[in-house]
Amino acid sequence: MGMGCTRVVERVCAAVGLLQEAPSRFERAESVAQGGVLWALPALLANGLLRRARECFRLPPGFYSLTQILVLLATLALARVKTLEQLRYQPAGEWGKLLGLDRIPEVRTLREKVKELAQPEAVSEWGQRLAQEWMAEEPEAAGFLYVDGHVRVYHGAQTKLPRRYVARQRLCLRGMTDYWVNDQQGRPFFVISSALTAGLLATLKSDIVPRLLAEVPGQPSEEELAAHPYRHRFTLVFDREGYSPDFFQSMWALRIACQTYHKYPSEDWPVSEFSEQVVELPHGESVRMRLAERGTRLGKDVWVREIRKLTDTGHQVSILTTNFEVPMTSIAAHMFARWSQENFFQYMMQHFAIDRLVDYQTGRADETAQVVNPAYRKLEQEIKTTTGKRSRKLAQFGAVTLPADSEVQAVAAYEQAKGQLREEIELLEKDLVALKAQRKETPKHVRWVDLPEPERFVPLAPTRKRFLDTIKMIAYRAESALASSLREVMARADDARALLREIFTTEADLIPDEEAGTLTVRLHHLPNRTTDQAARFLAAHLNATETVYPGTNLRLVYKLVSD
């Protein structure tokens, strides 16, 4: 029955189908490893870990309940146990005490539980309901939605996924692209994975915008939109990859505003146009920026607001938006808050392993889906290579100069070098013209079914990854909520998450009191007096929630050992 098993009768009953699920029963335990992770439980529950779970998921009768599995997966994520395989090296009995059990399931059992839970329709419904609730809780945060793609590199041999550019490695590698939708503080709402290479704009049109139109709360009615020509539903914020006047126009037809950096800004504006403005950043900080604004026409009939920031070095950063309702200081604040989403990607890769492969199964490809034509991509690469060679030859041609002495032999060598370089440049230019003509006749996108056989691929099975990513999103949002509370009393606000990671991995005593109806989680001391004071502040904040441990009647009480 595994190391640490003490509830033998219940496990035997579960094995023969006589037990629906084992109840959580806590016993007094001291110095439980990583017991501090229970300090995150109120935030996990507040962010919806169990709110809709029983409506979407079902587990067959067994020892472990749905509640215990979800709490285990979320607390493992916060304790930085990044994969299920790493559970082999964790103390099963110690983790069991945190769940009110004798031990947690083995890796194989937990994999089977995840497989049973990760049914496509159930995972999709759960994620959709959570996103709707998160947006409804903070409608203002859903007014500006940040969308960006994150490439998840795949090194396996199960399938040959199409190549795509990975900015952080500056290489074209095989993988999947996850398109995340976050708020201005970096908190995620949902993610859509795609093995196709259609790009950000195509994914926005086909998958993201239809879902946002159905889920974003507080959208104006059709009558309000008709009465106010500049009213919009919400604003999409993305990087230069999404720059497209046609896309801006198509989104405004739906009364959706867009915001991005100008990909092709014109000449610099006069410095006299800029004025110093106070800009409020998402976390409450105030900074001073020198800003200016104009109306700009893109193409023939796409009018946008262009806002520029003048940096200390004299560089002008240009922002475009079709949001005509908020002041330019708000536009600047939301645009420069894109760093929060980049930080989210970096943090999730480092601490929550969102790039890790969950299983080795593959899914089914949509035969009618549009993908980038490999022939077109090959021609583009050849054009870039040829253009680079021509540029180097032109530089060499300009560097060859006639010697000052102008001797006959030197002049002959000069003319010969110039002539040879000119001939090579002309040949490269002919090749370049031919390649561009060939690219013009080659379609950029083709259907999956029309790909050459060696280039066909099947996507990775997304459901288990999506299920675990949803739990990691809940864990991240819970950690963000706790960090927001800690920043009120910490001298360095950036240290809040580091302190939480310290708390989650610190030993704690578990003291149940059935008569008083409490479960005290008594955290051991942290490295210094300052962090202890911050932990006491957090404990008071958590105790005010009066959270009951799921599946029991015990109210959670948080304190430090000396309190």
Image (cartoon, rainbow, N blue to C red):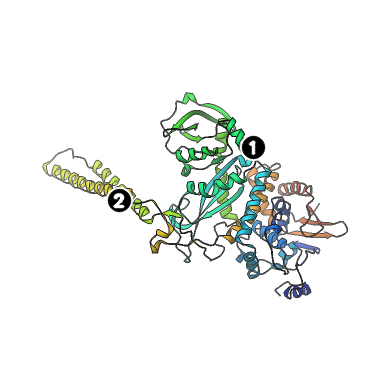
**Residue toward you, 86 or 550:** 550
**Outermost residue, top side:** 272
Locate residue 548, reporting x and y percent.
Answer: 79, 54
Tell me the element at label 2.
helix
Quadrant position of residue 339? top right
Quadrant position of residue 491? top right
Tell me the element at label 1.
loop
**Residue toward you, 6 or 382:** 382
**Residue toward you, 259 or 214:** 214
Q: Name the residue under label 1.
A: 284
Residue 475 placement, left or right of 379: right
Q: Mark 2 points at which residue?
A: 438
Q: Residue at coordinates 39% horizontally, 64% vertically from top-left?
A: 454
Locate residue 161, reporting x and y percent.
Answer: 46, 60
Labels 1, 2: front one: 2
Lower position in the chain sequence, tag 1 or tag 2: 1
Q: Quadrant of the N terminus?
A: bottom right
Cβ–Cβ below 8 Å for labels 1 and 2? no
Total of numbered circles in the picture? Answer: 2
Locate residue 386, reporting x and y percent.
Answer: 30, 50
Q: What's the CA distance linking mark 1 and mark 2?
A: 54 Å
**Residue toward you, 432 or 425:** 432
Locate residue 422, reporting x and y percent.
Answer: 20, 45
Of the residues shown, which amino acid type is indicated by label 2?
Answer: Gln
Residue 558 placement, left or right of 166: right
Of the residues shown, which amino acid type is indicated by label 1?
Answer: Gly
Bin the neighbour count of mark 1 within 10 Å (Cα to Cα): few under 14, some 14-19, many 20 and up.
Answer: few
Residue 498 appearing in the image: no
Q: Which mark is residue 276?
A: none
